[in-house]
Image (tube, rainbow, N blue to C red):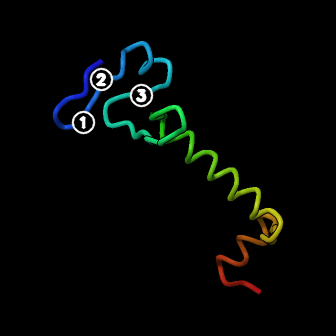
Amino acid sequence: MKLTVKGQVTIPQRLRKRYGLKPESEVVVEETAEGVLIKPAHADRLKQLKNALRKSKAVAPRYSADELMRMTRGED
């Protein structure tokens, strides 16, 4: 695999299919002890979302659907 003048590489089709990489997909490029790691960005985003949800469960109040409806309508 060759690096272009612009620093671009072509990811082989079998790997694009395996990891769900399509045109306009975002990837994360990380430096590791072994070299450069390219991975789908959604994996990082999902991990961040799970961590945020896990943290928020401890502090976020829980409301029933009826309570939420009353609050959004401005009812007491």
What residue is drawn where x is 56% and y is 39%?
A: 43
Q: Quadrant of residue 56?
A: bottom right
Residue 73 against residue 63 in the figure, above or below: below
Among the two numbered marks 3 and 1 on one chain, the one whose residue lies closer to the N terminus: 1
The disc at residue 10 is 2
What residue is drawn where x is 65% and y is 78%?
A: 73
Residue pointed to by mark 3: 21
Residue pointed to by mark 1: 7
Give the residue at the far front of this rendering. Answer: 33
Among the two numbered marks 3 and 2 on one chain, the one whose residue lies closer to the N terminus: 2
Q: Badge 1, how many Cα within 10 Å: few under 14, some, many 20+?
A: few
Of the residues shown, which amino acid type is indicated by label 2?
Thr
Q: Front-most of 30 and 49?
A: 30
Q: Give coordinates of residue 39: x percent, y percent.
A: 48, 34
Give the residue at the far bottom of this rendering. Answer: 76
Of the residues shown, which amino acid type is indicated by label 1?
Gly
Of the residues shown, which amino acid type is indicated by label 3?
Leu
Residue 60 against residue 42 in the figure, above or below: below
Q: CA distance from mark 1 to mark 2?
A: 10 Å
Q: Give coordinates of residue 52: x percent, y percent.
A: 68, 59
